[in-house]
Image (cartoon, rainbow, N blue to C red):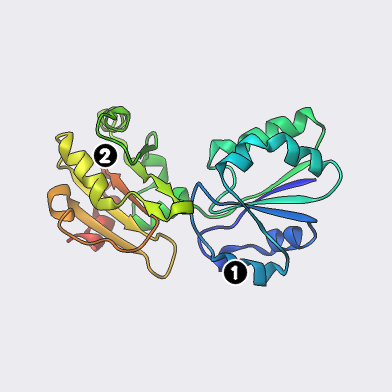
Amino acid sequence: MLYLIGLGIELKDLSLKALECVKKCDKIYLESYTSTGANLEDLKKLINKDIIISYRDKIENDSSEILEEAKKIDISILVYGDPLIATTHINYIIEAKKLNVKVKVIHNISVINSITETGLMLYNFGKITSIPFDNKNILAPIEILNNNLKIGLHTLFLLDLDPKNNKFLTINEALSYLIRNKFNNNCVTCCALGTGKQEIRYGKIKDLIKLNFNNFPQCLIIPGKLHFMEEEALELWKI
């Protein structure tokens, strides 16, 4: 059997249900390229089992091998945040069905629901987009932002990351990208949402870019049309 298990944002987010499942598994993979989270050594200590660190090439290219293993033994793929936020992991469910491999998904908190800490309502968000490291000639995020703004919806920007090489696109770099593309909207910046190091700031892009943002992971939001309760909540974070 294959378990797709969300680790959440911090170690203590691991649910009792998830812990019970992972402890009975014969083999445990940690998908470590779509986000960051609990320290590996702390995770090993909690689970009391070896964990195989797996990067994109392993998870995406060796899915058939992992699913063949899951026919014989119980396997967990641990994913920071929620296991089905990244489309990579949907493929496991599709392929497992074809191979008659049982799959159980255990969900957890992720950036997608943590953004409600800003006071913005989840159902007022439009299409999510991301800003890559090499973004000089990339316009897709701007097109998505414009389309969301046209219908009054908020836009969540996820920022590129490469945990293997400890490389992260910063809020300041993302704000520079927006400025280059002629935006100076009100913006919400978010650092380490859902953790004890959480930081939320709200203001004009030109003012936010002057600040330092030191905690990761980071993301930012351009609000669309605001409900009066959202307006009041954002005042809590105004610079």
Can you tell which quarter of the image residue 42 is in? bottom right
In the image, farthest residue toward the right: 72
Q: Residue at left 44%, top 48%?
A: 162
Q: Amino acid at mark 1?
A: Glu
Quadrant where the C terminus is found in the figure: bottom left
Q: Residue at left 27%, top 31%?
A: 142
Q: Earlier in the sequence, mark 1 or mark 2?
A: 1
Q: Is residue 152 above or below residue 49?
A: above
The residue at which mark 2 appears reads as 224
Q: Amino acid at mark 2?
A: Gly
Residue at mark 1 to residue at mark 2: CA–CA distance:
41 Å
Can you tell which quarter of the image residue 222 is in? top left
* Residue 157 location (% of width, % of height): 34, 42
Q: Residue at left 35%, top 43%?
A: 156
Q: Nearer the viewer, mark 1 or mark 2?
A: 1
Residue 177: numbered disc: none
- Residue at disc 2, secondary structure: loop
Q: Residue at left 52%, top 64%?
A: 10
* Residue 232 location (% of width, % of height): 25, 56
Question: Few, some or many C-alpha atoms within 10 Å of disc 2 (few <14, some 14-19, many ≥20)?
Answer: many
Q: Is residue 91 above or below residue 206?
A: above
* Residue 54 location (% of width, % of height): 61, 49
The residue at which mark 1 appears reads as 41
Report the front residue among 165 and 143: 165
Question: Few, some or many C-alpha atoms within 10 Å of disc 1 (few <14, some 14-19, many ≥20)?
Answer: few
Q: Is residue 215 above or below residue 94?
A: below
Contact? badges 1 and 2 (CB < 8 Å): no
